[in-house]
């Protein structure tokens, strides 16, 4: 396998930097590299766009996170309910879209369906945005701002109050005090502010009570506390989260596979017709299209269905020993790499297939240049076109699986070396050339 990998790497660099077995000049190589970079950037951009085409779980179920946060909040029910109601009304300022419109705008241009549960949730949430509730919220905010101002004033007075007490204990005359407030006056101001704060807090509690008991608010809060509805939403969200990476990878693969197939077809056709520049460009395109596919495949293996399935299986069988999944990947990835190498060996670097096509068209087995029927050596690359049959010791075509004289299977011949001696080329029957598509006949 290691020898095949080395041979594959050598062929890869040779195919990427030569035209008709001749190195391309530096300017042309730079131009090709710039084209490669431009196409690669656009390929990744297209992959990102098509990857965002299917609805993500957060887009298909936009109410799930808010609903989940409300249920996970450990504060008292009244406290978290008041905060949620105030935030919901404050988010619906005049001129802004409703929550239903925001949910629907989030799925425009995407493939998938918005959750009906979240649409109903949005309708209930929009219903609390009434003028009466807005006035209540405005009153709550004004009173809370007054409480904040009084609290800050009390904090400053207490700082001065402590210093005034120290001056009184020291026997300092009131007229000599450097502070703007005396201890008695400070105490009276603090008590007055505390009474105002208590009154404002009572009014805020009353307004919050009114806000919670409106029919619209009660309907929305009942939805938030509906256990069965939330459980159905949670199962749907988790199912979407489980399959979303797989769907995203599928769309990205569908984006790349036609490009790979087209580049491969152009490359094979250009090689068979000896179109050197087209063969080189199509080869670069084939590599550019395959690299992102490999990246996305590895990404899918880390976050997709396969990884989650293995993680769940390991967790069920062996508890929390999730590191064993990494052992499986260490075994799986080399096997995948071996499979990719074998695939390229069969499709792109198949020596026997190339040799068969070139022999039928009277071309050099190595460089694919046109030859005369009796040429034993290629005048372009010097490659010897024949090999000795192991059975009849006659000369037969190099790299082809059977002897043309006796039909015996041949050992694969991969050495691109010119033999020391120069044997004569075999005699062909009259009227038959190496380039014909007819089966050659053995001469007596």
Image (tube, rainbow, N blue to C red):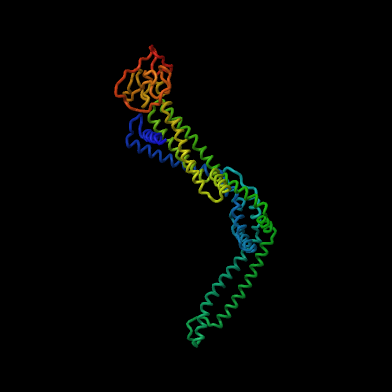
Going by the image, does 200 lie left or right of 322?
right
- Please say whether residue 329 is visible from this viewpoint: yes
Q: Nearer the viewer, residue 205 or 175?
A: 205
- Please say whether residue 48 is visible from this viewpoint: no
Compared with 237, 394 (above or below) is: above
Among the 4 quarters of the image, the one containing residue 154: bottom right
Q: Nearer the viewer, residue 396 or 118?
A: 396
Which quadrant of the figure contains the N terminus? top left
Where residue 337 sits in the image (x, y, percent)?
Answer: 46, 38
In the displayed image of the protein, which residue is found farthest to the left? 421
The residue positioned 63% from the left and 60% from the top of the image is 85
Q: How many marks?
A: 0
Going by the image, does 129 lie left or right of 50?
right
Going by the image, does 103 lie left or right of 347?
right
Compared with 328, 181 (above or below) is: below
Where residue 276 sits in the image (x, y, percent)?
Answer: 38, 29
Where residue 297 sits in the image (x, y, percent)?
Answer: 49, 41
Where residue 336 sits in the image (x, y, percent)?
Answer: 48, 38
Which quadrant of the figure contains the C terminus? top left
Among the 4 quarters of the image, the one containing residue 268: top left
The residue positioned 64% from the left and 57% from the top of the image is 129
């Amino acid at each position: 396998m290691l020898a095949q990998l080395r041979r594959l790497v050598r062929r890869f660099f040779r195919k990427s930097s030569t035209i008709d077995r001749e190195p391309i000049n530096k300017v042309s190589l730079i131009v090709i590299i710039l084209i490669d970079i431009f196409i690669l950037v656009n390929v990744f951009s297209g992959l990102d766009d098509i990857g965002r085409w299917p609805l993500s779980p957060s887009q298909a179920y936009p109410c799930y996170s808010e609903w989940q946060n409300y249920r996970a909040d450990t504060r008292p029910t009244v406290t978290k309910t008041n905060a949620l109601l105030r935030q919901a009304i404050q988010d619906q300022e005049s001129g802004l879209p409703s929550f239903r419109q925001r949910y629907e705008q989030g799925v425009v241009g995407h493939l998938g369906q918005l959750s009906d549960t979240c649409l109903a949730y949005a309708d209930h949430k929009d219903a609390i945005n009434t003028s009466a509730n807005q006035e209540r919220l405005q009153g709550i905010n004004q009173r809370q701002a007054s409480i904040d101002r009084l609290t800050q004033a009390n904090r400053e007075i207490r700082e001065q109050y402590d210093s005034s007490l120290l001056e009184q204990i020291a026997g300092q005359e009131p007229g000599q005090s450097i502070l703007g407030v005396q201890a008695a006056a400070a105490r009276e101001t603090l008590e007055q502010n505390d009474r105002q704060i208590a009154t404002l807090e009572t009014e805020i509690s009353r307004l919050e009570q009114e806000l919670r008991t409106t029919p619209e608010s009660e309907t929305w809060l009942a939805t938030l506390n509906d256990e069965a509805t939330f459980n159905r939403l949670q199962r749907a969200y988790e199912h979407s989260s489980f399959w979303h990476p797989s769907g995203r990878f599928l769309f990205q693969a569908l984006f790349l596979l036609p490009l790979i197939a087209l580049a491969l077809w152009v490359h094979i056709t250009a090689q068979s017709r000896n179109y050197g520049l087209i063969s080189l460009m199509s080869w670069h395109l084939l590599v550019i299209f395959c690299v992102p596919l490999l990246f996305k495949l590895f990404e899918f293996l880390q976050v997709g269905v396969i990884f989650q399935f293995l993680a769940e299986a390991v967790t069920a069988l062996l508890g929390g020993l999730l590191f064993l999944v990494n052992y499986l990947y260490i075994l799986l990835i080399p096997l995948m790499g071996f499979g990719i190498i074998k695939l390229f060996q069969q499709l792109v670097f198949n020596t026997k297939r190339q040799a068969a096509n070139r022999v039928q068209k009277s071309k050099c087995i190595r460089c694919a240049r046109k030859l005369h029927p009796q040429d034993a050596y290629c005048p372009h690359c010097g490659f010897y076109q024949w090999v000795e049959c192991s059975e009849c010791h006659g000369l037969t075509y190099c790299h082809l699986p059977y002897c043309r004289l006796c039909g015996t299977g041949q050992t694969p011949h991969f050495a691109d070396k010119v033999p020391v001696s120069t044997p004569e080329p075999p005699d062909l029957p009259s009227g038959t050339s190496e380039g014909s598509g007819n089966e050659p006949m053995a001469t007596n």
